[in-house]
Image: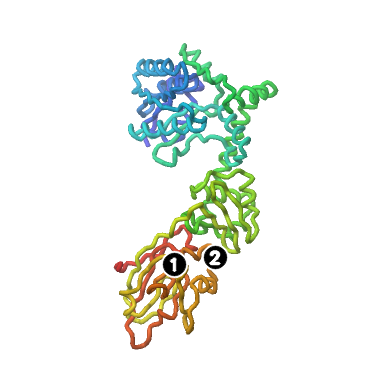
Amino acid sequence: MKSVSPPSPAAQDVVVRTVHSSYLAIGQPRSVLCAFSGGADSTALLCALVSLRSVLPFDLSALHVHHGLRENADRDETFCADLCQRFCIPFRSVRLSLRGKSEDEARRARYRALLDHAVRTGADVVALAHHAQDQAETVLMRLMRGTVSGIGGMEVLSGFCGQERVRLWRPLLALLPETLRAFLGRRGQSWVEDETNEDRSYLRNLIRHDVLGPMRDRAPACVTRIACSAGILGEESRYLDALAARLLEGNARVTSPCACIRAPVLYGAPPVLLRRCLRLFLVRWKQCEMPGMDQIIRLSRLGVGESCSIGGGCRALRTESYLHFFPPHPPSLPLVPLRALPNPGRLSGDGVRFQAIPKRLFSEAVLRPSAREDRIVPFGAEYTKPLRAFLSARGTEPSFRPYYPVLALGSEVIWVPGAGAGEKARVRPEEESVALYYPGFLPGDMDEAVPESADTEV
């Protein structure tokens, strides 16, 4: 990577130095999109980026999001456009219709507009002007909501709306808002004030004025200390995430139906790692909103045979072998066509993925989802039994039983991939046989590669 020279001595302001160091630390992105509201924080960030642009190898542009909610929104848009024109920065304003939207919905819409513009223009990062007080407010808000995994606060560099190409960059997290305003004052640079920042009906404003305000009166350094602690906790949280991901690998399936975690592995982990695994699993599962900490704790303490709701109509059930997760309307397990394999040695198969059957049945048999009326003659028996009873006798997990595929003639089952074959699959000495291979996911498969076969699909 090309090395860059440090800013000139005239630009060696603490704000510029901080942004410069952060830029180098995140890998020197080639294109930066600055989220620019016109307020003091984003104006300070834009000015710092402009100061660095002459010595750092990046393209700089700005996007203003016009929410259409405030009386002075047009004024702010004009201020941003004029400043970007003076700085010779490509500028665009996006107008959103957010009337009647909640604070969280408005935030999501704003981030979506930033992402769309970043993708369209090829930006590598979106620079946000969150500072140390924003970090402290975020930590307190997350503690109020019981989202313990979020007390690490915001990261300097993080993913964006579920995709990885464009990243969010917050280079000012270590600085106080007073530092940013002093920086603008030294430059003689004005900004605009958002009058809604005084509106205590917004939780963030309430925390800023009525919680952090008195705290800073008592302990002036508390914001810096909270932000510093958040950074350390964030590092520790990411380390726990890595450990949890490693534990879940090969021991969990996040795709419904049959979403589950192996219970002995999960419940054998230390409680702190167990809870982190549950949160990570639910983020990947994407079937419900993240439960509060009380529900995570309840999940972490489920006994064998116990179940609980996890919100949104979803529930979890613990058995001896698995912790199962059920959405309100589980989909069917997708079927994958069988593959016919050469069987010169007349192998009978393992009954799980490989099974030999008489060749005369192959053209008539149908692979399909199981049905309630299905019956099977157990191997070596002379009587039929319901498929559910056969699966129970085979020791299969009750929650998995509705999702096994079957190879059948009508309601008469020949083979249950993943569970075993019936007497109908027996190949007599005088018969030709065909060996079948099922390459799809089966109940109980975890999120890992399914064995592949190079033979032709039939």
Whole-percent x and y of residue 204?
57, 27
Element type at mark 1:
loop
Question: Foreground: 74 or 231?
Answer: 74
- The residue pinned by badge 2 equals 398
Q: Residues within 10 Å of mark 2 (few under 14, many from 20)?
A: few
Q: Residue at x 51, y 28 (%)?
A: 130
Colour scheme in the image? Answer: rainbow
Q: Give the quarter of the image for residue 266.
A: bottom right
Question: Foreground: 288 or 77?
Answer: 288
Look at the picture and state if 356 lies above or below 190. below
Whole-percent x and y of residue 190?
46, 13
| Residue 314 relative to residue 221: left or right | left
Whole-percent x and y of residue 221?
64, 25
Q: Residue at x 45, y 28 (%)?
A: 98
Hey, what amino acid is under mark 1? Ser
Tell me the quadrant of the picture where the C terminus can be found: bottom left
State the mark number for residue 370: 1
Element type at mark 2:
helix
Hey, what amino acid is under mark 2? Pro
Q: Residue at x 43, y 59 (%)?
A: 332
Nearest to the eye among marks 1 and 2: give it: 1
